[in-house]
Image (cartoon, coloured by chain):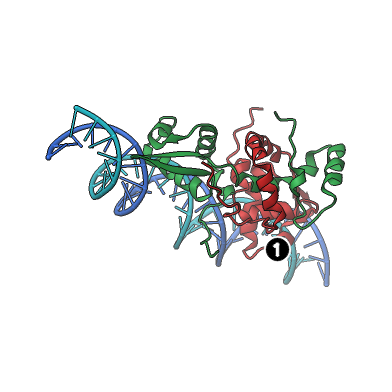
Chain colours: A red, B green, C cyan, D blue
DNA sequence: TCATTGCGAAACCATTTGGTTTCATAAACA
DNA sequence: TGTTTATGAAACCAAATGGTTTCGCAATGA
């Protein structure tokens, strides 16, 4: 047993926009590497390496079928993220009204890469 | 507008364990750099650079007080994380919760993720 | 059998990251 | 005034990251 500490954790795995896009892509479908790579502006090998990282973080499952390796989402590790995040929920619960307005104004980004300057700084002090 | 795209986004900012620890530390307290750095096994300068990255991601606020620079948590950008994560909740949620959310959201809308109403407390507390 | 397809491993490269030490400067204090 | 304190900027470094191209090999198919 004694599962060796994985080299890549969930936080690191989702830090890269390509890998976030991969997770979305594999959320419902099971796809082989080459098909996956057609969705990205980089080599198949590069995509394959991203898939490896996701695999090390436990975020995707691979299955060999003939000469193909098919990948699909394995969402369980994301629960750790959710737990981490839950600590901070109390903070925006307080500001719920402000955030609600923000979201309803349509500022939410849907690209998955999510532009940073997301929420304007209200000088709260 | 025209605000130059910040170099660091939330996903990248929280990828580093030191920075996650910083967020926790500053969650309730407002602290100056030197005091903060006492909590970490690295130089003050190194901590300062982490704080800069968090600042660029909008996750901390700095305030100059005399010769000190005091930092505190600015949790709003974490909401973006929650939004991203919400897409995957259906995978680990039980069917009842999923149905509940579906009903509460009225339906899948623009982001395909969540509207303000889905800000809900989770059992994690 | 032989060519093709799907894939990972390896070697390589440029850039980023996370750390260091040193230095300059502004604020506080004796 | 002169000294100490708090901090950021700069220069530097090793390692990690994200990409490439080349190669080998197993599975498929003509």
The residue that mark 1 highlights is A39
Find residue D9 and report its horizontal and vertical position in percent: 34, 52
Q: Which residue is drawn at 69% across and 61% down?
A: A37
In the rendered image, is residue A61 in sight? no
Q: Residue at x 73, y 45 (%)?
A: B86
Find residue B2 and report its horizontal and vertical position in percent: 53, 65
Q: Which residue is drawn at 64% across and 31% down?
A: A3
Mark 1: give few (<14), some (14-19) or many (20+) Cα within 10 Å.
few
Examine the image and state in which quarter residue A8 appears.
Answer: top right
Q: In this view, does A28 lie above or below A43?
A: above
- Which quadrant of the figure contains the N terminus of chain B? bottom right
Q: In this view, does A60 lie to the left or right of B4?
A: right
Of the pair A97 and D25, the residue shown nearer to us:
A97
Q: In this view, does A88 lie above or below C25?
A: above
Disc 1 chain ID: A
Label 1 residue SS: loop
Find residue B92 and report its horizontal and vertical position in percent: 78, 39
Find residue B81 and report its horizontal and vertical position in percent: 65, 46
Tag count: 1
Of the pair B19 and A14, the residue shown nearer to us:
B19
In the rendered image, is residue B21 in sight? yes
Q: In this view, does B9 lie above or below D3?
A: below
- Which quadrant of the figure contains the C terminus of chain B? top right
């Amino acid at each position: 047993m004694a599962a060796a500490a994985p080299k890549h954790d969930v936080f690191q795995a989702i830090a890269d926009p390509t890998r976030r896009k991969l997770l979305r892509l594999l959320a419902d479908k099971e796809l082989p590497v080459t098909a996956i790579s057609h969705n990205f502006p980089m080599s198949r090998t590069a995509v394959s390496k991203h898939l490896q990282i996701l695999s090390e973080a436990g975020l995707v499952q691979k299955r060999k079928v003939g000469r193909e390796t098919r990948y699909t989402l394995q969402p369980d590790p994301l629960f750790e993220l959710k737990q981490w995040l839950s600590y901070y929920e109390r903070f925006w619960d307080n500001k719920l009204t402000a955030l609600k307005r923000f979201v309803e104004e349509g500022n939410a980004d849907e690209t998955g890469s999510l532009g940073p300057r997301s929420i304007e700084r209200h000088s709260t002090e």
